[in-house]
Image (cartoon, helix red, strand yellow):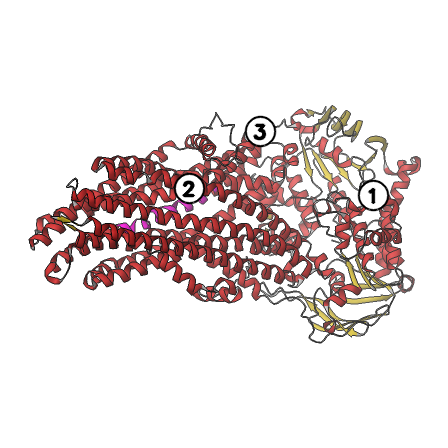
């Protein structure tokens, strides 16, 4: 698969003039056609067959009138062979024309969807290549829209494109032929082309404004509805249902008004599109009658001329709709390119070094701030944890505990200093665990092959074994959207099991056990300490009973490591630590998940 | 999965939709009349050709002035018809917008009045898309597909009548030869519709796949599962593309079917016309005109095949919308309400049982959450509800606030049964402060006025001082005009709590229901919260859902719930002295927070 290299940088969506729209469209199409040019070529061939047959079918009509109908009515006698010839011509051309349509539409569709697929997978790979620093800056909803909606929209223009090429061909063929048949009549007929194009241009210009307004109001409506339903408890608690309905009604009215203005503009346009060609048609008939009188053409020629003219009108009428899909596609494509063109952000986990033997985690002079102006979150933190130990990070809210874990996990790049880990890699369990909709087993293995014993061990160590065994299907139980929903504590334990099953030598738990009750939390910490493998565990926790179970405590104050030692020692020697423990003691939940 | 869907046929669904939004069908007959006139322009040309050939374009004598006169008459017809077309299009579009506007508002209002059981997290997305995307699908249908149906339908009717008027024999031949098209359309249409349904399903499913992949990207990377997941996503993307292509190819075969039938019909008409001939009273002009009419007659078929899918999705959307409107609204309002008595209000539970079970669901989940609760709380008392999660604390509080009605038994406020109290009256007297208070993406003042729309800035500031929160207010950059961000995201969890407490205070309720937050909050905010809570509860009947036993210890009376039953009831000291379950839980809690071993 080739990636379009020369991306048109001038994909400006705001301007409405047709010229710029055309320029935008051409750049967009050039990029998109690079994905599957052969499919497009087949569709265009079908479209050309359609255009040629359309013109040819007018000969069929001329033949029917001049050689079949009029002579028969004059002579009063049917010539069967002439009729059969006429039938063969008309039906043959008709079938070929239909065949052209089938080929054009099928392959336009195939090209369209294969291109969507190519764009989508480019996006998926790019997004999944970016490290979590990049993901943190992005809104999930926005990324999903780019992958799922914008890639569709970008390729949308490819659907009607072969048809447009056939329209161009048709306009030239018909226009040329009409002039060849009869010059004055031909000139009148092709005058309709610029008229309809101008109508289209004028209409698009007017309608764009209304559609933009409507689109904007629709966005406002959508977020208002979201917010209002999100806050349904508040709305109900304050009896504000009527007020909310009024608020929504205001936005909806603006949406409706914009749409009604668009409808009004459109109805005028539709009426003109219907009326103007008919008027030209009548003019053709009257002038044509004069031409027949002066013996410049036959009645059959005039009839086929008019037939051909009506065939020309239809594609001219809808070419405007084809053009109107350009801005939509262009803005979709622009949003797709924004992601594809972004350089891959450096993955900070690559900086992490191997810890020397016997050391689980070592930090040397590590500092972190989100950018140069923002305050320092971690201030030259250094420590060394022997392999296999369990250490608790303790600190007040906002002291930098989570940042410390994120730096150790290689999710954030320290502004200075060095991180070393046993096995170079740590498994981190986040505060809010993310579980996928699938079986419990799938969530633990995440695509890797693990033996049943490994899964069972992970479930045991995370204290998930008891509740999982109570489920009807055990580890095969589906969770998430199409399955059962787990409680917060159960989710945390499953995500812990997943981390354990990964087999890393360092395990980082960011407030992972907060949703567990005190007894379960103690069981988890105890089992982790008793692990047969030498796993170094760093835990953020704030329950004194849990903290007391750890081998060591790292005490963080304002981003600095101010004390380091066993809990009992810190309780005796560090007044700040003692005060913090007391405040934890006062207001901790009794915990029951 | 359990979409609220009304299971009716398409015709009944459309009929019901028209009744729910009368503006949609209002004056539809007249609109159809204009559309009928409006398609006239498409008929003028064949008629003119016939007239010209028969009366003006004789091979040896061309009557130009006659044809010119015909032209003028035809032009007038075209103008009238175009104006009618404009009227029809505008009428249909405007009526549709108005109808769907009222449907949207009705739906929105209805959803807000559904009971909380119908409002859980899982269903929220579905409810939002009822009001947004489903109504949009209907709008799209009316402005494109519906319009085509109207115009094409009237074109076929108009052309057919002109054909019959010209020559009924030829018309019958034309109808007979093109009739099998109906069968073809019906056969292929079913395939097309199911192909479209499959691709729609896969489109929707794929969005879910993407959303999960992006949300879980950090986890997937952390666990080296990216490649596995990307491969499986690639398969889903391919399947989605395949199903869309399949629908497209079926459509591609269906689209020119009208044209294919047209050439056969034209040749049959010409053959029959030649057989009838002048002897049968047919003119050459009429036959040529008929050839044009036949093309016109079958022309709309192509567009019909394009619209089939739109009709299906519009009916599906309408069905979902009606399904929501059919869901009965939450606690019903009394016909002749009783006013709540003045002053502090007592709370009574008389044999109350409760089971959740959403009426939107097919399956009834009727495990009882509360089991024959009897409870009397005198006016002004401060009680704390404690018990493990799932014990029924939150549900009990919700019943007091009438966010749901008991399945059995009665809840009384100030001696008045809640079912006899008007919602507005209740909301003035009773306020719930939820665990995770929701703030709207606006200023603090906007959020406070949500409780009391007419409150002046001074009143709002007073509410802050009443709760001793002036010092906090001063730390905010723009005071009460500070923007709180999406869902209050610019504030910390604790600060959101503070705003919610002030919001409750603004109403000056007599009953206060507090669902205590579990999230950890920094120390100074914690102090502010407990101080504000104490102030707020003063002199009011207060029900706290306590997650921390320290909160329970501060209440006048503690009620311990287990499995939906009250198992202990008394003051903290009494319960400790009783040395029962509460005392044991308290003991465990105290030791778990003990800092030294």
Mark toward the start of the polypeptide (2 vs 3): 2
The residue marked by circle 3 belongs to what chain?
Answer: A
Residue A517 percent location from the top left of the image: 77, 51
Chain ID at mark 1: B
Left/right placement of residue A518 relative to residue B123 reads: right
Residue A492 visible to an observer of this rendering: yes
Residue A23 lies within the magenta run? no
The residue under the point 46% across, 55% down is B90
Residues A324 and A184: in front is A184
Task: Residue at 55%, 47% (x, y): give it.
Answer: A214
Q: Circle 3 sits in a helix, a strand or a loop, which is it?
A: loop
Q: Vertical placement of A144 versus A486: above or below?
A: above
Farthest front residue? B65
> As rendered, which of B185 and B473 lies closer to the eye?
B473
* Range shown magenta: B237-259
- Image location (x, y in percent) of residue B60: 11, 48
Number of marks in picture: 3
Q: Is residue B55 left or right of residue B79?
A: left
Whether labels 2 and 1 share one chain: no
Q: CA distance from mark 2 to mark 1?
A: 63 Å
Circle 2: is it few (<14), some (14-19), or many (20+) Cα within 10 Å?
Answer: many
Check disc 2 and report the residue beneath it.
A200
- Numbered mark located on residue B246 in the image: none
Task: Relative to A104, say whether B431 is above or below.
Answer: below
Compute the Cα span from label 2 to label 3: 37 Å
The reply to whether residue A548 is in sight is no
Q: Which residue is mark 1?
A: B522
Q: Which mark is residue A342?
A: 3
CB of mark 1 within 8 Å of CB of mark 3? no
What is the quadrant of residue A563 in the picture?
Answer: top right
């Amino acid at each position: 698969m080739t990636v379009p290299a020369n991306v048109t940088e001038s994909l400006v969506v705001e301007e409405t003039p047709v010229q710029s729209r055309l320029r935008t469209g051409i750049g967009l199409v050039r990029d998109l056609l690079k994905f599957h040019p052969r499919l497009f070529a087949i569709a265009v061939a079908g479209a050309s067959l359609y255009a040629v047959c359309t013109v040819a079918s007018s000969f069929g009509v001329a033949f029917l009138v001049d050689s079949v109908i009029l002579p028969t009515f004059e002579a009063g006698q049917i010539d069967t062979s002439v009729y059969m010839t006429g039938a063969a011509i008309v039906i043959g051309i008709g079938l070929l024309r239909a065949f052209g349509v089938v080929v054009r539409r099928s392959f336009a569709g195939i090209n369209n969807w294969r291109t969507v697929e190519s764009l989508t997978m480019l996006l998926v790979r790019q997004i999944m290549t970016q490290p979590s620093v990049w993901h943190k800056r992005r809104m999930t909803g926005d990324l999903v829209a780019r992958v799922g909606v914008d890639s569709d929209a970008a390729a949308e223009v490819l659907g009607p494109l072969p048809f447009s090429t056939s329209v161009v061909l048709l306009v030239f063929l018909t226009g040329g032929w009409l002039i060849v048949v009869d010059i004055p009549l031909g000139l009148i007929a092709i005058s309709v082309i610029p008229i309809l194009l101008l109508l289209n241009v004028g209409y698009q210009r007017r309608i764009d404004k209304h559609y933009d307004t409507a689109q904007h109001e629709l966005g406002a409506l959508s977020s208002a509805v979201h917010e209002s339903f999100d806050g349904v408890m508040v709305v109900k608690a304050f009896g504000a249902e009527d007020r909310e309905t009024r608020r929504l009604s205001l936005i909806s009215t603006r949406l409706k008004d914009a749409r009604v203005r668009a409808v009004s503009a459109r109805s005028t346009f539709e009426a003109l599109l219907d009326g103007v060609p008919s008027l030209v048609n009548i003019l053709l008939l009257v002038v044509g009658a004069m031409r027949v009188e002066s013996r410049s053409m036959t009645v059959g020629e005039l009839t086929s001329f008019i037939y051909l003219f009506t065939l020309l009108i239809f594609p001219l009428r809808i070419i405007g709709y084809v053009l109107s899909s350009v801005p939509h596609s262009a803005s979709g494509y622009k949003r797709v390119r924004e992601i594809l063109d972004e350089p891959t952000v450096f993955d900070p986990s690559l900086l992490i070094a191997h810890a020397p033997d016997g050391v689980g985690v070592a930090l040397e002079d590590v500092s972190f701030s989100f950018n140069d102006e923002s305050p320092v979150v971690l201030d030259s933190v250094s420590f060394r944890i022997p392999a296999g130990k369990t250490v608790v990070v303790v600190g007040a809210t906002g002291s930098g505990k989570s940042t410390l874990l994120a730096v150790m996990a290689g999710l954030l790049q320290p502004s200075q200093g060095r991180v070393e880990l046993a096995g170079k890699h740590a498994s981190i369990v986040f505060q809010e665990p993310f579980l996928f909709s699938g079986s419990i087993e799938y969530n633990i293995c995440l695509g890797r092959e693990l033996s049943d014993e490994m899964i069972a061990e992970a479930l045991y160590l995370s204290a998930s074994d008891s509740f999982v065994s109570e489920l009807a299907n055990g580890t095969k139980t589906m969770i998430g959207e199409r399955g059962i929903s787990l409680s917060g504590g159960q989710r945390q334990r499953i995500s812990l099991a997943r981390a354990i099953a990964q087999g890393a030598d360092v395990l980082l738990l960011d407030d992972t056990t907060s949703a567990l009750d005190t007894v379960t939390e103690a069981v988890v910490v105890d089992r982790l300490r008793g692990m047969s493998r030498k796993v170094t565990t760093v835990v953020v926790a704030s329950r004194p009973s849990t903290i007391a179970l750890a081998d060591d405590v790292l005490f963080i104050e304002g981003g600095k490591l101010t004390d380091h030692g066993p809990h009992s020692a810190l309780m005796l020697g560090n007044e700040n630590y003692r005060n913090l423990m007391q405040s934890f003691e006062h207001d901790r939940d009794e915990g029951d998940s | 999965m359990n979409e609220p869907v009304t299971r009716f046929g398409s015709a009944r669904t459309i009929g019901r939709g028209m009744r729910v939004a009368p503006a949609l069908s209002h004056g539809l007959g007249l609109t159809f009349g204009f559309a009928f006139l409006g398609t006239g322009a498409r008929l003028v040309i064949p008629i003119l050709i016939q007239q010209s050939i028969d009366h003006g374009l004789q091979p040896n004598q061309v009557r130009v002035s006659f044809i010119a006169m015909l032209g003028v008459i035809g032009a007038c017809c075209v103008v009238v018809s175009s104006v009618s077309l404009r009227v029809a299009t505008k009428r249909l579009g405007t009526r549709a917008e108005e109808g769907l506007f009222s449907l949207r508002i009705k739906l929105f209002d209805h959803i807000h009045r559904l009971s909380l059981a119908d409002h859980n997290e899982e269903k929220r997305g579905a409810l939002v898309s009822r009001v947004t995307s489903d109504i949009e699908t209907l709008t799209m249908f009316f402005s494109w597909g519906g319009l085509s149906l109207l115009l094409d339908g009237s074109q076929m009717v108009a052309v057919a009548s002109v054909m019959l008027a010209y020559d009924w024999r030829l018309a019958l031949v034309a109808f007979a030869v093109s009739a099998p098209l109906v069968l073809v359309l019906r056969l292929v249409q079913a395939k097309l519709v199911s192909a479209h349904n499959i691709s729609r399903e896969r489109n929707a499913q794929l969005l879910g796949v993407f959303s999960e992949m992006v949300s879980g990207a950090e986890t997937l990377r952390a666990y080296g599962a990216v490649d596995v997941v990307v491969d499986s996503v690639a398969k889903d993307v391919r399947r989605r593309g395949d199903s869309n292509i399949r629908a497209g190819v079926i459509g591609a075969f269906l689209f020119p079917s009208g044209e294919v039938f047209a050439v056969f019909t034209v040749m049959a008409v010409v053959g029959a016309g030649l057989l009838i001939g002048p002897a049968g009273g047919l003119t050459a002009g009429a036959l040529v005109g008929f050839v044009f009419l036949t093309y016109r007659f079958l022309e709309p078929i192509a567009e019909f095949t394009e619209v089939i899918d739109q009709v299906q999705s519009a009916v599906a959307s309408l069905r979902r919308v009606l399904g929501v409107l059919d869901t009965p609204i939450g606690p019903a309002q009394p016909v002749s309400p009783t006013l709540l008595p003045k002053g502090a209000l007592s709370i009574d539970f008389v044999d109350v049982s409760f089971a959740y079970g959403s009426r939107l669901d097919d399956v009834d989940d009727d495990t009882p959450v509360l089991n024959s609760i009897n409870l009397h709380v005198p006016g002004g008392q401060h009680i704390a509800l404690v018990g493990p999660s799932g014990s029924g604390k939150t549900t009990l509080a919700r019943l007091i606030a009438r966010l749901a009605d008991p399945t059995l038994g009665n809840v009384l406020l100030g001696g008045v049964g809640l079912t006899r109290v008007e919602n507005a009256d209740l909301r003035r007297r009773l306020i719930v402060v939820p665990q995770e208070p929701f703030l709207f993406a606006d200023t603090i003042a906007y959020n406070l006025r949500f409780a009391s729309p007419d409150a002046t800035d001074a009143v709002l500031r007073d509410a802050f001082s009443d709760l001793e929160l002036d010092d906090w207010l001063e730390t905010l950059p723009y005071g009460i005009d500070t923007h709180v961000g999406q869902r209050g995201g610019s504030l910390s969890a604790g600060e959101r709590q503070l705003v919610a407490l002030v919001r409750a205070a603004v109403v000056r309720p007599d009953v206060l229901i507090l669902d205590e937050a579990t999230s950890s909050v920094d120390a100074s905010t914690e102090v502010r919260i407990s101080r504000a809570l104490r102030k707020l509860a003063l002199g009011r009947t207060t029900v706290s859902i306590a997650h921390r036993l320290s909160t329970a210890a501060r209440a006048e009376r503690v009620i311990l719930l287990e499995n939906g039953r009250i198992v202990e009831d008394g003051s903290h000291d009494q319960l400790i002295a009783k040395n029962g379950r509460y005392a044991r839980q308290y003991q465990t809690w105290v030791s778990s927070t003990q800092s030294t071993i």
